[in-house]
Structures are given as C-alpha cells and as structure tokens.
Image (cartoon, grey):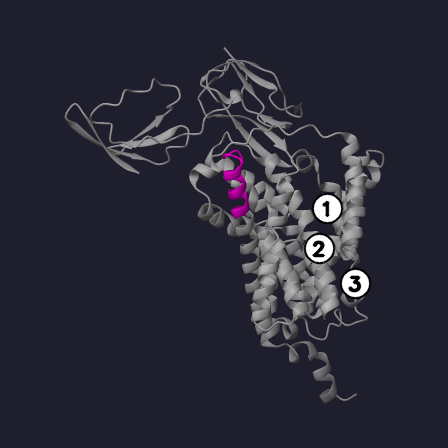
Amino acid sequence: MKYTVKIEEKSYEVEIEDIHARPVIARVDGQRFEIHPENGIKPEATQETRFIKPIELPKPTASQTGTSRELTAPLPGTVVEVFVKPGDEIELGKVVLVIEAMKMKNSIRSTRAGKVAEVLVHAGQTVAHKQAMVKFE
Amino acid sequence: MNIAELIPELLKGLLNFTWGNAVMITAALVLIYLAVFKEIEPVLLLPIGFGCLLANIPMAGMTAAEGMMGVLYDAGISTELFPLLIFIGVGAMIDFSPLLSQPKMALLGAAGQFGIFGTLILAILLGFPLNQAASIGVIGAIDGPTSIFVATKLAPELLAPIAVAAYSYMSLIPIIQPPLMKMLTTKKDRLIRMEYAPKPVSQKALLFFPVILTLVVGLLVPEATPLISMLMLGNLLKASGVVDRLNKAAQNEIINIATLFLGLVIGATMDAASFLNLATIQILGLGLIAFGLDTVAGLLFGKLMAVLSGYKINPLIGAAGISAFPMAGRLAAKVANDEDPNNFILMHAMGANTAGQLGSVIAGGILLSIVSHLV
C-alpha cells in the first residue's frame, strides 16, 4: 500500500509491503527501511499524518508481550532446533527456535529485541505450554 | 509355427498399443514425476503412477484375474482389506487429545461433511444413479480409504477415478484450500489468536474413547463399523501404552505395506479402455466440487462459531473439518501462522481435523446404510 507523508513541508512516498509483518518493510522514495513498531514510542498523530487509517494489530497475549524477559513456549512439543546462544543480540521477530508439535515444525520468533542471557532448552527436549525457553538480559 | 505367425506374436505388445495407452502412460509418468521430483504425496503417487504404467502395457497380463494386480485386487480391494488395514495405521497415528479437550470441535467435523451430500445431489442431477452419486460425493471428505471402501461396496465400476480423485486432491490441499480460506475469512478473522489452553485429558479418557466410540457408532450406524473399528483399534494400540510393538507395527509396517499394494492396485485399474471416458472427467470435476463445498461448509461453520464465541475461535480451523488427516489440520495452522507468526492454532486445528476424520467415516457409513437399502 502506498502513502504520501508530509513532514515539515516535504512530501515522501512511502510504500508498505505488509503492515502485519515484523519487521514492517517500508520503502521511502525507493530506499528500504525495516521498522519494529512495538519497540518504538508511538508517535503523536500530527495534522499531516492523521489521514493514515490506524490498523488494528493482534493484541499480544501474556506470554507474547514485548516487555517480558522470558520467551515462553506458545504450544507444547519437542524443541528440534535452537538458533541462539547466550550473548546473542537478537531482533524482534527473529526465529529463535523450532518446536515440533503433532509432527509439524513451528518457528518460534522472539517477542522482543535484546541480548540473550540464558537458553533454557536444548534440541530434543520436550517443552510444556508456557514453559520458559529463553531469558533476556 | 511359420514366420508369418511368429512376427505378430513377437510384436503383440506394440501391435495392441493404443493412443489411449500412450495418454495414460504419460499420466503415469506425471504422477511419478510429481512424487519423485516435487515430493507431492510420494507414498501414494509413486505406487499409483507405477501401477498405471503397468496397466497400460498391452498383453502383459498383470491386471488379468490371475495376474499379480488381479490377485491383489481380489485380495485387498474387493474384500475391503487394504483400506481397513490402512485405517489401523491411521488410528495409531491420531492423537484425540485436542478433540477430547475441546469437544465443540466435533461440530466442525460434522459441518465439514456437507459437501458429500451436496455433491451427491449434483451427481444425481447430472444423471449418475444413486449408488454412483453417493460414492462420488464421498470424495469431498478427501479421505482415500473411506472413498475406496464406499465405492467398492456401492459402485466398484467407478473405483479407479474415485480413488485417483480422492488421492490427487489430497495432494492438492495446499493449492485448493488457501484461496477458499482467504475468500471466506477476513484478515481480522485469520488473526484471531486461540490461546493453547485445552483442559488436560486423562489417560482413562484416551483409553475408553476408542472403545466407546466403536460401540456407539457401530450400534447407530452398523455399516460404518469396519472403518471406525479399525481406526479405533489402531488408536487403542497407541492409547493403551502396553503394546508398543503393535503400535509401531501399525504406524509403520502395516500401513506401509497396505498403502504400497493399495496404490499399485488402484493405479492398475487406470487402463486406457476403462479410464479415458466422460464419466472420469465428470467424477474428477464433481470430486473437486465436493472438496470445495466441504471446505466452504467447514469455513462458514467456523465463522459462525467465531461470531457466537465473541471472536475467540479462528474460523480457519473449520477448513480442517473435512478429514484429510493430518494435512488439512497442518494447513489451517500454517495459514494462521503465515498471517501472524506468533499465532499457533495447531492444536485447535488438529481437534477439528480428527473430528473431520471421524465425521467422514460416519458420513460414509450413513451413506452405505441409506443407499444400500434404496438401490
């Protein structure tokens, strides 16, 4: 979807691929930007930006809030792959590990950006629903 | 024997080769290609493709009554043995916990069978007799063994196109269902998160479920007993926890051997003379309509449940109510996950999918019961 955004009398052509994807990929006058809306401070709507229709995003559940210091299992299953280790700086939305449940592989993404403090699970381990898997600093 | 008599004998394969055989051998090679290079349902498409290849080699004799395919047909298809053996394996692979912890998912399994009856009416309008129309309708559940079981009893002359349609559409689920899912649900619907919080299911419940269901369905719809009982036998092997060897055998050797021979024999029924006709094209078309109607009915019912629950149920799980276990369940979960990478509705979709598996077996039994009394 294309938008025209006017900032300080200058107009910008902004093209957003999918507002629900994380990060949101936006092209401003041909230049590509990756945006993590949940990380930033919500900007006040100005006279110029008010015409953009607000889009309702799914509300994160308790286990998926971006402020939690733990990444928990959204479903029970077996961890088959772990892609992070302590000390890694990870972005919001990065695939952290894969849980296999009912013979289907599910990519589990980070619900916040930050530095990994501890990885509490390993490949082959069975996890219960809401079990903590990764701790952030 | 003089030379003039010998040459036709030596060349009888080529002399009896028809353009129809060439078309069917091409179809067989396409099936083998899809299985090997695209890995689309290889376990099914590879033996079906090879069986089709054999059926179109003239004068080979393999499909004659005393040939290998003829013997296997009589042993495993006419007797309905192969689909039933496959169901022992399918039962051992099914986990009924998601359904037992969310019994309302059973409604989606019932809604997902609407297309069977809708297509039955359509097939009658196209001029198919009731027994054939009922067999064609069952394709909609995309449940190969049930389709074969019903067709063998009601319309064995249509077995080949019905089995080919059921198994081909099973491999096309990821192509056929997503457009319907997107058409009948809004983005807001697809983003509905369903927190994984089913009630814990006791070991006793898992153990009693297959026994009680066999008795209840068997007493209410006796014609469904062979299918439901073998499905539940497999599940009991798994749930009991005391016959690990048998459970593993059901999930591996038994289902694998039965699938190999069933695929070969179904492929071997695809000879040009009996397969290349208008009825086959009509059956493939009607099967597709049945599949579409089943998916639409499931999705619309899912949507109704979403509204009634105050948008706590993601209507995508309705599409898993058709049967096609476990592909349809995984696909519904994948579509929701593609829309929102933090949304996991797998358990709920599998609940609807296992309900769909039971629904298609029961619907098949009901059709057998009604139609065999009417024709």
- Earlier in the chain: of badge 2 and badge 3, it is 3
Residue B304 is covered by the magenta coloring = yes
Label 2: element kind: helix
- Earlier in the chain: of badge 1 and badge 2, it is 1
- Chain designation of label 1: B
Out of A54 and B56, give the one closest to the viewer. Answer: A54
B374, above or below A112, in the image: below
Residue A82 is covered by the magenta coloring = no
Check if mark 3's residue and mark 1's residue have beta carbons within 8 Å.
Answer: no
Residue type (three-letter) at the residue carrying disc 1: Val
Label 1: element kind: helix
**Which residue corresponds to mark 3?**
B72
The x, y position of residue A134, in whole percent, is: 56, 17
Which disc, if any, is residue B222? none
Outermost residue on the front side: it is B308
Residue type (three-letter) at the residue carrying disc 3: Leu
Out of B181 and B309, give the one closest to the viewer. Answer: B309
The x, y position of residue B235, in whole percent, is: 77, 41
The x, y position of residue B119, in whole percent, is: 58, 62
Q: Main secondary structure of the magenta part?
A: helix
- Chain designation of label 3: B
* Cα–Cα span, label 2 and label 3: 16 Å
Q: Quadrant of residue B29?
A: bottom right
Check if mark 1's residue and mark 2's residue have beta carbons within 8 Å.
Answer: yes
Q: Quadrant of residue B2?
A: bottom right
Residue range in magenta is B299-314
Q: Residues within 10 Å of mark 1 (few under 14, many from 20)?
A: many
**Which residue corresponds to mark 2?**
B145
* Cα–Cα span, label 3 and label 1: 21 Å
